[in-house]
DNA sequence: ACCTGAACACCGTTCAAGT
DNA sequence: ACCTGAACACCGTTCAAGT
């Protein structure tokens, strides 16, 4: 049976879950599709092009109810305030959505970071982020820079999270290696922090760092305004 | 002539600068060393082990005068205050140093992010970061999480910076592709932000995001303290 | 201890030729 | 339009054998 682009794409995403990004190979993909080696190249110009399409598929819908905001939220029940959602909460929600999207497939965050360019869902995410930051009072330049900062954080954190999850025993061995390398004499603070690393606290850890960046944006945004906003 | 570990390491770093991370190959390295293919494996167990050693070499000295702080700064002239350097400035300085270290070699940031584990200079950096944050009043847990946030930012930003630099014409082509993909109707804010992207502003861009994160840490740190610290 | 030579088991990509 | 078959130019890693 004839293949089409979408079948190749979804087989590639399935293979990603099964094998991981490092074992995702054009040849294994062809085998999974029951087709010869070069066949996939008719549908995707290169492996890079396939990876980028995969990355954008991951981001499907991340920015969806964000742009329309409250009017939509009423219908979807995602929020139920009479007031428009504050910009900082929207930012946080969008960041959480990006993280969830990246977590939806094995090595999703690394996949995303390997895709250099401007596909539709990634653009929609960027637009939503910057729009919301502008709404929070940032200039176009500051908004785009702050959006970068947020995105680096989300992606960096999620890459680490997925790498830890992929380790043989769920990260316990890696944690052990780290514990072994940290000498309590030379690295007293690292040693003290070690207790908080193995952690099933990924959600809290993520939220903490996100709140840090959002608080930084808030303080920077209001610094140029009326002395005391309340 | 016989090789030693250090010769392999420094040839690898030179090859990184010449060829970039993607073209850094055990075989090319052997050729550069005038030696057979398998020879390098006597000095490094695997390519991964070599990459990690390279990454740690990059970080040589990043944390050096940071731990000793002011006493040292007097002698080196890096700062010349009569007072101890405030924790937030130290954090910023350490982050700038990490960035410089990563920039010192082509693809340095990607190299660092590919090295999963705890080598001496990376540990010293982590210790310095967390120690300084604790000095700023964070708990061990918060300090280690905040350190992660900062490091994700530095690495994420620097990866992007080096990727842009490595593009054929210094990023102009990439910027053009982006400009082409952004429809001013659908993505008005992205479109407005586009003006700030091509930019030789890397230094400013980095400083802006860093200051965002540091401000976030400051506001979170003081939130649990006396109402108004000054 | 340190290296050679040769092999093993893979890769991404291209492309004439088929249907 | 879509795929096969086969090749090209590579990879990382291992390992007996040499010195």
Image (tube, coloured by chain):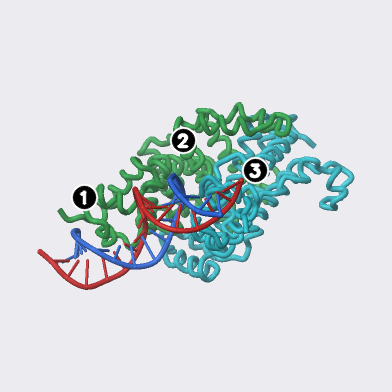
Chain colours: A green, B cyan, C red, D blue
Which of the two discs, 1 and 2, labels the residue nearer the N terminus? Answer: 1
- Side of A59 where A42 appears, left or right: left
Residue placed under numbered mark 1 in the picture: A34
**In x, y percent, where is residue B145?**
61, 35
> Label 2, label 3: how many angstroms apart (C-alpha)?
20 Å
Q: Nearer the viewer, residue A73 or A212?
A: A212
Q: Nearer the viewer, residue B195 or A40?
A: A40
Q: Is residue B193 visible?
A: no
Which mark, residue A167? 2
User: Measuring 39% from the left and 43% from the top, which residue is drawn there?
Assistant: A20
Mark 1 and mark 2 on one chain: yes
Residue B18, above or below A221: below
Q: Chain of mark 1?
A: A
Asked where in the image residue D9 lies, by quadrant, the reply is: bottom left
User: Measuring 55% from the left and 48% from the top, which residue is drawn there?
Assistant: B42
Give the structural element (helix, strand or loop) at label 1: loop
Labels in figure, total: 3
Which mark, residue A197? none
Give the structural element (helix, strand or loop) at label 2: loop
Mark 3 and mark 1 on one chain: no
């Amino acid at each position: 049976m004839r293949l089409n682009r979408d079948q190749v794409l979804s087989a590639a995403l399935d293979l990603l879950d099964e094998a991981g990004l490092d074992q995702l190979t054009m040849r294994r993909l062809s085998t999974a599709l029951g087709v010869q080696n070069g066949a996939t190249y008719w549908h995707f110009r290169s492996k890079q092009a396939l990876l980028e399409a995969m990355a954008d598929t991951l981001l499907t819908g991340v920015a969806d109810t964000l742009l329309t905001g409250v009017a939509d939220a009423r219908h979807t029940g995602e929020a139920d305030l009479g007031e428009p959602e504050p910009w900082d909460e929207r930012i946080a929600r969008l960041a959480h959505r990006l993280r969830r999207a990246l977590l939806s497939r094995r090595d999703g965050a690394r996949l995303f970071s390997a895709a250099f360019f401007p596909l539709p869902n990634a653009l929609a995410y960027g637009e939503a982020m910057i729009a919301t930051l502008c709404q929070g009072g940032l200039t176009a330049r500051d908004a785009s820079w702050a959006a970068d900062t947020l995105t680096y954080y989300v992606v960096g954190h999620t890459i680490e999270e997925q790498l830890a999850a992929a380790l043989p025993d769920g990260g316990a061995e890696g944690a052990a290696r780290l514990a072994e390398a940290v000498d309590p004499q030379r690295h007293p603070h690292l040693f003290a922090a070690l207790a908080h690393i193995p952690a099933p606290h990924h959600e809290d850890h993520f939220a903490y760092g996100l709140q840090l960046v959002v608080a930084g944006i808030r303080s920077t945004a209001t610094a140029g305004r009326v002395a005391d906003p309340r």
